[in-house]
């Protein structure tokens, strides 16, 4: 039931763009995105709900395709501070929350 | 600082010992989650509280694990008869109820090492 993310890892130069994908085998009601830096706790980035509502940081955008059960996170003009591991997460039914497999992002000067 | 605190931050114990971790959520948040995270993996759901009621428990959670949230405030996670496989980061997150639109706020975690 764990969402699958792709790519597993990506290396960018500052200023480049990246897309991180999250796919689910089950219907998604909402998708959450978090970033985790090494040795730290996950930090909220964005929530997307069925129907198009979303909440998140201004500099980050994401999409949610309900029919394909997929979400994508778009990172534009990457900065060194974007480095970390990105996780999508979702609640299918009930109150169990499942995090995805993770995508390691490294931004180099 | 998200406003969620966990104590202790690090715990080293010997196999077979019991350990207890504490989580203090953001005061107005009625939802509380516990996760376990091992190196290179995403957080793995353990259990969920709404106020003082434990509403969900992962099937992966053995009977050596127990959690409480008395009075719907702080929560404790106890592991009895620890095993080396319990070594991990234990994360707590709190969330405001009433909407799926609300995010989780994570504490800094408790790193457990079982020798």
Image (spheres, rainbow, N blue to C red):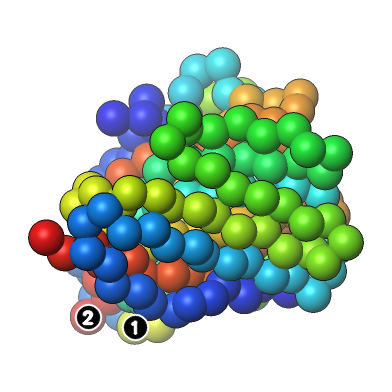
- Name the disc covering residue B115, or none: 2
Q: Distance between the residues labelled 1 and 2?
A: 6 Å
Which residue occupies the foreground of this view, B88 or A72?
A72
**Residue plotted at (56% across, 72% down):** A5
The 10 Å Cα crowd at callout 2, few under 14, some 14 to 19, many 20 or more, is: few
Q: Considering only vertical position in the picture, is B68 above or below A109? A: above
Local SS, label 2: loop
**Residue plotted at (79% across, 75% down):** A25
Local SS, label 1: helix
Left or right: where does residue A105 sit relative to residue A44?
left
Which residue occupies the foreground of this view, B42 or B32?
B42
Left or right: where does residue A71 sit relative to residue B111?
right
- Name the disc covering residue B23, or none: none
**Residue plotted at (82% across, 67% down):** A68
Question: Can residue B107 be seen from the camera position used here?
Answer: yes
| x, y percent for residue B29 | 58, 24
Residue A48 lies in what quarter of the image? top right
Q: Considering only vertical position in the picture, is A55 above or below A74? A: above
If you read the primary sequence from the N terminus, does the residue marked by circle 1 or circle 2 appear first? 1
Chain that bears disc 2:
B
| x, y percent for residue A109 | 11, 60
Q: Which residue was labeled with disc 1?
A: B84
Determine contact: label 1, label 2, CB under 8 Å: yes
Q: Considering only vertical position in the picture, is A76 above or below B58? A: above
Question: Can residue B32 be seen from the camera position used here?
Answer: no
Q: Residue furthest left?
A: A109
Residue A84 lies in what quarter of the image? bottom left
């Amino acid at each position: 039931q764990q969402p699958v993310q792709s790519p597993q890892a990506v290396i960018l130069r500052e200023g480049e763009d990246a897309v991180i994908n999250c796919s689910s085998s089950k219907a998604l009601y909402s998708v959450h995105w978090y970033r985790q830096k090494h040795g730290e706790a996950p930090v909220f980035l964005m929530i997307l709900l069925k129907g198009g509502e979303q909440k998140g940081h201004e500099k980050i955008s994401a999409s949610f395709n309900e029919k394909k059960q997929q979400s994508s996170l778009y990172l534009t003009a990457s900065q060194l501070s974007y480095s970390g591991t990105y996780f999508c997460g979702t609640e299918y039914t009930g109150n169990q929350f499942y995090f995805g497999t993770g995508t390691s992002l490294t931004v180099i000067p | 600082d998200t406003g969620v605190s966990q104590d202790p931050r690090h715990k080293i114990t010997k196999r077979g010992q019991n350990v207890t971790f504490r989580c203090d959520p953001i005061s107005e948040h009625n939802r509380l989650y516990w996760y376990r995270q091992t190196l290179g993996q995403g957080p793995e759901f353990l259990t969920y509280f709404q106020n003082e009621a434990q509403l969900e428990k992962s099937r992966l959670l053995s009977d050596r694990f127990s959690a409480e949230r008395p009075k719907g405030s702080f929560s404790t996670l106890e592991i009895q008869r620890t095993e080396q496989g319990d070594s991990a980061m234990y994360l707590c997150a709190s969330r405001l109820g009433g909407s799926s639109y609300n995010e989780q706020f994570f504490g800094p975690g408790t790193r457990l090492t079982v020798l």
